[in-house]
Image (spheres, rainbow, N blue to C red):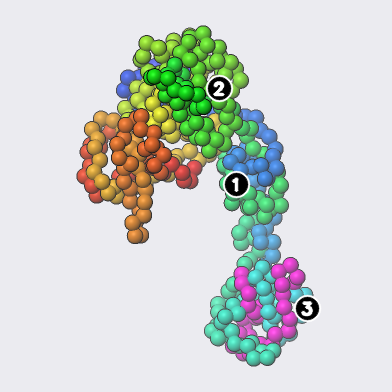
Amino acid sequence: MQPQLSDFVSNASCMDDYDPNAMSVTQARHYIQQFLSPVSETETIVLKESLGRVLAVPVISGMNVPGYNNSAMDGFAFRHAEAGNPLKVIGTAFAGIPFTSDIPAGCCIKIMTGAVIPPIVDTVMMQEHTSIEGELVTLVKLPAIGTNIRLTGEDIAVGQTVLTLGHRIEPADMGLLASLGIGEIEVYRRLKVAFFSTGDELVSIGKPLQQGQIYDSNRYSLWGLLQAIGVSVTDLGNVADDPATLEKILLEASENYDVVITSGGVSVGEADFMKQLLAKHGQVLFWKINMKPGRPLAYGKIGAAHYFGLPGNPVSAMVTFYQFVQEALKTMMGAANLTPPSFQVECVNAIKKATGRTEFQRGILFKEGETWKVKTTGEQGSGILSSMSRANCFIVLNEQTGALDAGKMVEVQPFHGVC
């Protein structure tokens, strides 16, 4: 039975090692996952609209692929037992135009890639390994029986599960489904996500900046991150630090969307009204994560909507999205594969770090000869948004790791990869 957030809020001590002022990255992910469940509503969509959608039912093949034995290349089809003698060519099998006549002893046919293999022959030799004189073809070397023949059902067999429940459709999957004659699939409905920024210092692009103001970059970063996941996105804009306005926007969003995300307002500043509003209307957990950047994080529910409160610093907002929100949204979308890929590579420069917290430094994966390596983007401040633009991965340094010399192996987590 799934735990209720209300029970946890009223009795947080029931959780082992729960400390809102010193939460590890792993613990925070674990707590969030306990309170999530996929959307249940489904819809049937046409194949061309399926990219990025999540399967609500597995896809079972109703046919064999290939549907018949066929040639893997251009060449000659013959009986393997007769391969030691010159063979007379009596016709040609084309892809889509089978050779249907008899093939007498001592004879063969020319065959094109994809053409049906006549039942009486059992091997295909590529054209480059033959010698032709008039109507006779001689094999330069003897192949194994069955060479260059794709067997019926070799790729996919009737009744085979082709794509599993929770699979996120990729371009290759669309081609695979088309090869089975499947034009429609049942998927979970799109997750509805709304987000807004808070802060009087923020200004929308297109307006002039006054002293002390900055452009609201977080809304555009979040828009891109959410679009990449494949949810239905609504930008509610920048909301001023006014309790009444914040309350109105927050409550309306919680009634109309599955997830509400904010950036800013979850720290300890005097103008950070979000905490007060969330305590009034929701069941929300505020954590100080042992990580850099992105220490303040809020998660909870407002009505039926899940809520994520991200830091206001541009890099912190993106890092916390990658590390917590992205995985949570995929869970709610019904996706089966959540863990982002990571692997060890050599870091070519020294890294500054103190022990005691996990750091997600921005890195650039690059290839040197045949070996992949990584380097940092330079200064790692939480306000240096250009570091995220230059980077293509996180260098993940756990709590026990301190400063590292150049040449040490580090864990990297690419921004884009298998998911």
Q: Does 74 appear in magenta?
A: yes
Which portion, as a residue range, is magenta? 72-98
Residue 52 image position (x, y, % from top left): 58, 41
| Residue linked to disc 3 | 101
Secondary structure of the residue carrying numbered label 3: loop
Q: In this view, does 83 lie above or below 96?
A: below
Residue 359 image position (x, y, % from top left): 31, 34
Q: Is residue 295 above or below residue 63?
A: above
Which of the pair 360/327 is nearer the observer? 360
| Residue linked to disc 2 | 236
Q: Quadrant of residue 127?
A: bottom right
* Foreground disc of the pair 3, 2: 2
Residue 125 image position (x, y, % from top left): 60, 78
Whether residue 146 sits left or right of residue 46 in the image: it is left
Q: Is residue 288 above or below residue 155?
A: above
Q: Residue at x 38, y 19 (%)?
A: 212
Whether residue 70 sits left or right of residue 330 in the image: it is right
Q: Along the polypeptide, which appears first: circle 1 or circle 3?
A: 3
